[in-house]
Protein backbone atom coordinates (compact mmCIF):
# COMPACT_ATOMS: atom_id res chain seq x y z
CA UNK A 1 0.00 0.00 0.00
CA UNK A 2 1.01 3.66 -0.01
CA UNK A 3 -0.27 5.95 2.73
CA UNK A 4 2.45 8.63 2.84
CA UNK A 5 4.97 9.85 0.30
CA UNK A 6 7.25 12.80 -0.48
CA UNK A 7 8.00 15.10 -3.40
CA UNK A 8 11.28 16.98 -3.04
CA UNK A 9 12.21 17.92 -6.61
CA UNK A 10 11.75 21.42 -7.98
CA UNK A 11 8.96 22.40 -10.38
CA UNK A 12 11.56 22.69 -13.14
CA UNK A 13 12.83 19.18 -12.39
CA UNK A 14 9.29 17.86 -12.84
CA UNK A 15 8.68 19.88 -16.01
CA UNK A 16 11.85 18.41 -17.53
CA UNK A 17 11.23 14.81 -16.42
CA UNK A 18 7.56 14.64 -17.39
CA UNK A 19 7.77 16.87 -20.49
CA UNK A 20 5.49 19.55 -19.09
CA UNK A 21 5.23 23.11 -20.35
CA UNK A 22 5.27 24.46 -16.80
CA UNK A 23 4.61 23.53 -13.18
CA UNK A 24 3.34 26.06 -10.66
CA UNK A 25 5.84 26.81 -7.86
CA UNK A 26 5.64 24.68 -4.70
CA UNK A 27 7.97 23.92 -1.78
CA UNK A 28 9.49 20.50 -1.01
CA UNK A 29 6.89 18.25 0.62
CA UNK A 30 8.34 15.69 3.00
CA UNK A 31 5.21 14.08 4.42
CA UNK A 32 2.26 14.07 2.02
CA UNK A 33 -0.80 12.59 3.71
CA UNK A 34 -4.29 11.45 2.67
CA UNK A 35 -6.81 14.21 1.85
CA UNK A 36 -4.00 16.65 1.04
CA UNK A 37 -3.57 17.94 -2.51
CA UNK A 38 -1.20 15.88 -4.61
CA UNK A 39 0.30 16.60 -8.01
CA UNK A 40 -0.76 14.39 -10.90
CA UNK A 41 0.35 14.41 -14.54
CA UNK A 42 -2.30 13.70 -17.17
CA UNK A 43 -2.80 14.15 -20.89
CA UNK A 44 -4.40 17.49 -21.62
CA UNK A 45 -5.69 19.31 -24.70
CA UNK A 46 -3.96 18.49 -27.98
CA UNK A 47 -2.16 15.62 -26.27
CA UNK A 48 0.08 17.90 -24.19
CA UNK A 49 0.78 16.71 -20.67
CA UNK A 50 -0.38 18.90 -17.82
CA UNK A 51 0.12 19.01 -14.06
CA UNK A 52 -3.08 18.92 -11.99
CA UNK A 53 -3.69 19.23 -8.25
CA UNK A 54 -6.18 16.73 -6.90
CA UNK A 55 -7.24 15.65 -3.43
CA UNK A 56 -5.65 12.37 -2.42
CA UNK A 57 -8.54 10.00 -1.85
CA UNK A 58 -10.58 9.03 -4.91
CA UNK A 59 -14.34 9.60 -4.82
CA UNK A 60 -16.20 7.83 -7.66
CA UNK A 61 -18.55 10.02 -9.70
CA UNK A 62 -21.58 7.97 -8.64
CA UNK A 63 -21.14 8.70 -4.91
CA UNK A 64 -23.94 10.92 -3.62
CA UNK A 65 -22.27 12.26 -0.47
CA UNK A 66 -18.43 12.15 -0.23
CA UNK A 67 -18.57 12.64 3.53
CA UNK A 68 -20.28 9.26 3.89
CA UNK A 69 -17.86 7.43 1.58
CA UNK A 70 -14.54 5.88 2.57
CA UNK A 71 -11.68 7.62 0.80
CA UNK A 72 -9.92 5.33 -1.67
CA UNK A 73 -6.22 6.11 -1.28
CA UNK A 74 -4.98 3.05 -3.17
CA UNK A 75 -6.34 0.76 -5.86
CA UNK A 76 -5.17 -2.82 -6.32
CA UNK A 77 -3.82 -3.11 -9.86
CA UNK A 78 -4.92 -6.74 -10.15
CA UNK A 79 -8.62 -5.83 -9.98
CA UNK A 80 -8.73 -2.13 -10.89
CA UNK A 81 -10.22 -2.70 -14.35
CA UNK A 82 -13.26 -4.50 -12.93
CA UNK A 83 -14.01 -2.72 -9.65
CA UNK A 84 -16.95 -0.28 -10.00
CA UNK A 85 -15.10 2.35 -7.98
CA UNK A 86 -12.12 2.42 -10.36
CA UNK A 87 -12.97 0.98 -13.78
CA UNK A 88 -14.10 4.24 -15.43
CA UNK A 89 -11.01 6.09 -14.21
CA UNK A 90 -8.81 3.19 -15.32
CA UNK A 91 -10.29 3.40 -18.79
CA UNK A 92 -10.43 7.17 -19.20
CA UNK A 93 -8.34 8.99 -16.56
CA UNK A 94 -4.99 7.33 -15.92
CA UNK A 95 -2.34 9.60 -14.44
CA UNK A 96 1.21 9.70 -13.14
CA UNK A 97 2.01 10.74 -9.56
CA UNK A 98 5.48 12.31 -9.26
CA UNK A 99 7.29 11.23 -6.09
CA UNK A 100 10.72 11.21 -4.49
CA UNK A 101 9.86 8.12 -2.47
CA UNK A 102 7.28 6.80 -0.04
CA UNK A 103 6.91 5.61 3.55
CA UNK A 104 5.92 2.17 4.73
CA UNK A 105 5.53 0.51 8.11
CA UNK A 106 6.72 -3.00 8.89
CA UNK A 107 4.38 -4.82 11.26
CA UNK A 108 6.24 -7.55 13.19
CA UNK A 109 4.64 -10.96 13.65
CA UNK A 110 4.67 -10.18 17.36
CA UNK A 111 1.61 -7.92 17.62
CA UNK A 112 2.92 -6.38 20.84
CA UNK A 113 6.08 -5.13 19.12
CA UNK A 114 6.05 -1.57 17.70
CA UNK A 115 5.81 -0.94 13.97
CA UNK A 116 8.92 0.26 12.21
CA UNK A 117 8.67 3.13 9.71
CA UNK A 118 10.81 3.18 6.56
CA UNK A 119 11.60 5.92 4.07
CA UNK A 120 11.73 4.12 0.72
CA UNK A 121 13.60 6.11 -1.94
CA UNK A 122 15.36 5.47 -5.24
CA UNK A 123 18.67 3.72 -4.61
CA UNK A 124 21.96 5.32 -5.58
CA UNK A 125 22.47 5.30 -9.34
CA UNK A 126 18.76 5.61 -10.14
CA UNK A 127 16.95 8.83 -11.11
CA UNK A 128 15.70 10.61 -7.96
CA UNK A 129 12.16 10.94 -9.34
CA UNK A 130 9.68 8.10 -9.75
CA UNK A 131 6.18 8.10 -11.23
CA UNK A 132 3.51 6.11 -9.43
CA UNK A 133 0.59 4.89 -11.51
CA UNK A 134 -2.47 6.93 -10.57
CA UNK A 135 -6.15 7.40 -11.35
CA UNK A 136 -8.19 10.60 -11.30
CA UNK A 137 -11.93 11.17 -10.91
CA UNK A 138 -14.00 14.37 -10.76
CA UNK A 139 -16.91 14.32 -8.33
CA UNK A 140 -19.73 16.77 -9.11
CA UNK A 141 -22.15 17.78 -6.36
CA UNK A 142 -25.84 18.52 -6.71
CA UNK A 143 -25.05 22.24 -6.54
CA UNK A 144 -22.54 21.99 -9.40
CA UNK A 145 -19.44 22.04 -7.21
CA UNK A 146 -16.56 19.91 -8.43
CA UNK A 147 -13.76 18.09 -6.60
CA UNK A 148 -10.86 16.49 -8.46
CA UNK A 149 -9.73 13.40 -6.56
CA UNK A 150 -7.20 10.67 -7.15
CA UNK A 151 -5.57 7.48 -5.89
CA UNK A 152 -2.34 5.53 -6.29
CA UNK A 153 -2.18 2.04 -7.78
CA UNK A 154 -0.45 -0.74 -5.86
CA UNK A 155 0.97 -4.12 -6.78
CA UNK A 156 2.63 -7.05 -5.06
CA UNK A 157 5.99 -6.30 -3.48
CA UNK A 158 9.21 -7.23 -5.24
CA UNK A 159 11.74 -9.41 -3.35
CA UNK A 160 13.66 -6.36 -2.12
CA UNK A 161 10.60 -4.91 -0.41
CA UNK A 162 8.65 -8.00 0.65
CA UNK A 163 10.40 -8.14 4.05
CA UNK A 164 8.77 -4.81 4.91
CA UNK A 165 5.30 -5.10 3.34
CA UNK A 166 3.51 -7.31 0.83
CA UNK A 167 2.25 -4.37 -1.30
CA UNK A 168 3.97 -1.37 -2.86
CA UNK A 169 3.12 1.37 -5.39
CA UNK A 170 3.05 0.68 -9.11
CA UNK A 171 5.95 2.55 -10.75
CA UNK A 172 5.57 3.55 -14.40
CA UNK A 173 8.91 3.75 -16.20
CA UNK A 174 9.67 6.91 -18.15
CA UNK A 175 9.72 5.09 -21.48
CA UNK A 176 6.12 4.00 -20.82
CA UNK A 177 4.66 7.40 -19.84
CA UNK A 178 3.08 7.93 -23.26
CA UNK A 179 1.31 4.58 -23.39
CA UNK A 180 0.08 4.80 -19.80
CA UNK A 181 -1.38 8.30 -20.23
CA UNK A 182 -2.94 7.64 -23.65
CA UNK A 183 -6.41 6.51 -22.65
CA UNK A 184 -7.75 7.01 -26.18
CA UNK A 185 -5.59 4.44 -27.94
CA UNK A 186 -4.72 2.13 -25.04
CA UNK A 187 -7.37 0.50 -22.89
CA UNK A 188 -6.76 -1.23 -19.55
CA UNK A 189 -5.77 -4.49 -21.23
CA UNK A 190 -3.07 -2.71 -23.28
CA UNK A 191 -1.39 -1.25 -20.19
CA UNK A 192 -1.86 -4.19 -17.80
CA UNK A 193 1.77 -5.21 -18.30
CA UNK A 194 2.92 -1.89 -16.82
CA UNK A 195 1.28 -2.61 -13.47
CA UNK A 196 3.95 -4.96 -12.20
CA UNK A 197 6.30 -4.90 -9.20
CA UNK A 198 9.16 -2.43 -9.65
CA UNK A 199 12.52 -3.86 -10.67
CA UNK A 200 14.79 -5.06 -7.89
CA UNK A 201 17.39 -2.47 -7.01
CA UNK A 202 15.16 0.50 -7.80
CA UNK A 203 14.51 1.39 -4.15
CA UNK A 204 16.37 1.34 -0.88
CA UNK A 205 14.62 1.39 2.50
CA UNK A 206 15.92 3.54 5.35
CA UNK A 207 14.60 3.00 8.90
CA UNK A 208 13.28 6.26 10.33
CA UNK A 209 11.56 7.38 13.52
CA UNK A 210 7.81 7.48 14.02
CA UNK A 211 7.73 11.25 13.52
CA UNK A 212 6.31 10.56 10.06
CA UNK A 213 3.15 9.22 11.75
CA UNK A 214 2.16 12.82 12.53
CA UNK A 215 1.18 14.93 9.54
CA UNK A 216 2.24 17.96 11.61
CA UNK A 217 5.84 16.77 11.10
CA UNK A 218 6.38 18.06 7.58
CA UNK A 219 10.09 18.83 7.39
CA UNK A 220 13.26 16.90 6.47
CA UNK A 221 13.52 15.52 10.02
CA UNK A 222 11.00 12.79 9.13
CA UNK A 223 13.59 11.27 6.78
CA UNK A 224 16.51 11.21 9.22
CA UNK A 225 17.85 7.65 9.55
CA UNK A 226 17.59 6.00 12.93
CA UNK A 227 20.94 5.86 14.76
CA UNK A 228 22.79 2.54 14.27
CA UNK A 229 21.80 -0.06 16.82
CA UNK A 230 18.53 1.58 17.81
CA UNK A 231 16.24 -1.34 18.55
CA UNK A 232 12.82 0.06 17.74
CA UNK A 233 11.16 2.99 16.06
CA UNK A 234 10.93 5.74 18.68
CA UNK A 235 10.35 9.47 18.62
CA UNK A 236 11.94 9.73 22.05
CA UNK A 237 15.09 7.98 20.86
CA UNK A 238 15.16 10.31 17.86
CA UNK A 239 15.17 13.36 20.09
CA UNK A 240 11.47 14.16 20.01
CA UNK A 241 10.63 13.22 23.58
CA UNK A 242 7.60 11.37 22.23
CA UNK A 243 5.72 14.61 21.62
CA UNK A 244 4.59 16.07 18.33
CA UNK A 245 4.43 19.79 17.81
CA UNK A 246 0.85 21.10 18.05
CA UNK A 247 -1.19 20.72 14.86
CA UNK A 248 -3.80 23.06 13.48
CA UNK A 249 -7.51 22.45 13.69
CA UNK A 250 -7.51 20.06 10.75
CA UNK A 251 -3.90 18.90 11.30
CA UNK A 252 -2.91 20.64 8.09
CA UNK A 253 -4.57 18.11 5.83
CA UNK A 254 -6.80 20.54 3.95
CA UNK A 255 -4.23 23.24 3.16
CA UNK A 256 -2.71 23.24 -0.30
CA UNK A 257 0.98 23.16 0.69
Image (spheres, rainbow, N blue to C red):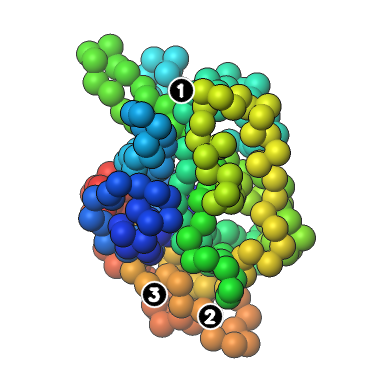
Q: Is residue 146 visible?
A: yes
In the picture, measured across the screen, residue 16 lies left or right of residue 115, that is left
64 vs 240: above or below:
above
Mark 3 touching mark 2, by CB under 8 A?
no
Q: Residue sitting at 68 percent across and 27 percent down?
A: 189
Residue 228 placement: quadrant = bottom right
* Foreground of the two, 214 or 223: 223
Number of numbered tags placed on the structure image: 3
Task: Kindly report which numbered mark, 1 or 2, lies closer to the viewer in this rendering.
Answer: 1
Instruction: Identify the residue position indicated by label 1 in the image.
Output: 60
Give the farthest residue toward the bottom: 228
Instruction: Please provide percent x and percent y for residue 67.
Output: 37, 27
Q: Residues within 10 Å of mark 3 (few under 14, many from 20)?
A: some
- Could you tell me which secondary element the residue under label 1 belongs to? loop
Instruction: Please provide percent x and percent y for residue 218.
Output: 34, 64
Instruction: Identify the residue position indicated by label 2 in the image.
Output: 226
Mark toward the start of the polypeptide (3 vs 2): 3
* Foreground of the two, 27 or 176: 176
Q: Residue sitting at 42 percent across and 27 percent down?
A: 137
Q: Is residue 55 visible?
A: no
In the picture, measured across the screen, residue 109 lies left or right of residue 67, that is right
Amino acid sequence: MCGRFALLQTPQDLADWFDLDAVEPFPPRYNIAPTQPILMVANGPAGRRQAILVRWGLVPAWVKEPGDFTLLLNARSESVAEKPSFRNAMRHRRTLVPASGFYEWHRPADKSAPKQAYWVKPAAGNPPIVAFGGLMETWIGANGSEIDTGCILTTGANPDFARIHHRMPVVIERKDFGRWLDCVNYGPAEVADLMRPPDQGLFEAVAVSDRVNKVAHSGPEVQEPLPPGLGHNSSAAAGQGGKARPAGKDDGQFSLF
